[in-house]
Amino acid sequence: MITDIIFDFFGTLVDYSEKWDSADTNTSYEYFCSLGFNMEEKEFTRCFDDCFADLTKKAIDNKTEFHMYDLGKYFFHKYFDHPIEDLENKTFIDKSIDDWNRYVVYFDGIQDFILNLSKTYRLSILSNTSYPDLIHGNLIKMNLKDCFHKVFTSVEIGTRKPNRGIFEYVLNDLAIKSSNAIFVGDSYKDDYLGAETVNMVCFLIDSKSRYPDSIDTKIKNIFELNGRLRGI
């Protein structure tokens, strides 16, 4: 019997821009300059993205996770050999997150959809994210925070999808078996294959037909889940 639905967040419950610097005004760059550092904006963006890629690769290789505040410290150390103070680093990263978050898109009808699901199932979120407040803040803006029993993030657990350990952690915390839950996400590797490691069914959102047709749990968008749940 399915009692729980566990969702990925970005790309699943909300859409988003994959370019962290897509806002018209890059306030993190402006703050960076106000601290007395000098770098052309395009170079700044390239270097910051390279640092993010470095830490992401390390996290994947080591089956760990990093916090965005670690990214800020790494950026200033790598390019300026500067041990930035915690308060300045927090301000810098918070501004970069705010810039990126301007381009998060809420799907039309998502509020009613989640409210209705929450009447039948216990809902949770499991996301690979290095900044937990980003999810909590968006849930508040969407008026959906109270619909979710738990929000699990990779940075708080210490490892990331698709590692088996993060799925086991969530199932243990929820005190359920994998047969009592379904996972919903948009990443074949992180969500679909990750859920498979604990024998949990994953409905894979494939709006651009990127994944094999042999996957019989593919859906085009989050709203198709309703029809598929009736068959479980």
Image: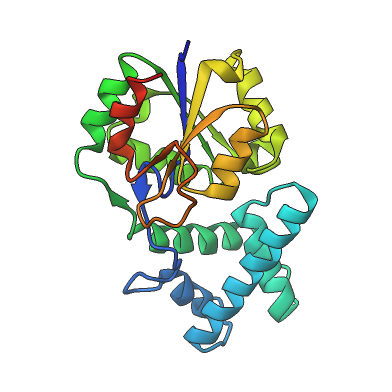
Most extreme residue toward the top, as rendered?
1
What residue is at 51 percent from the left and 49 percent from the top? 187
* Residue 67 visible in rendering: yes
Residue 216 lies, in percent from the top left, at: 45, 37
Along the viewing direction, whichever of 113 and 196 lies nearer the viewer: 196
Residue 20 lies, in percent from the top left, at: 46, 66
On the rendered image, what quadrant is the C terminus found in? top left
**145 relative to 191 in the view: left or right:** left
What residue is at 33 percent from the left and 60 percent from the top? 103
* Residue 82 visible in rendering: no
**186 relative to 131 in the view: left or right:** left
Residue 224 image-quadrant placement? top left
Q: Is residue 99 positioned above or below 78 on the image?
A: above
Along the viewing direction, whichever of 194 and 25 lies nearer the viewer: 194
Looking at the rendered structure, the number of numbered marks drawn on it comes to: 0
Most extreme residue toward the front, as rendered?
214
Residue 79 lies, in percent from the top left, at: 69, 80
Q: Is residue 107 positioned above or below 216 on the image?
A: below
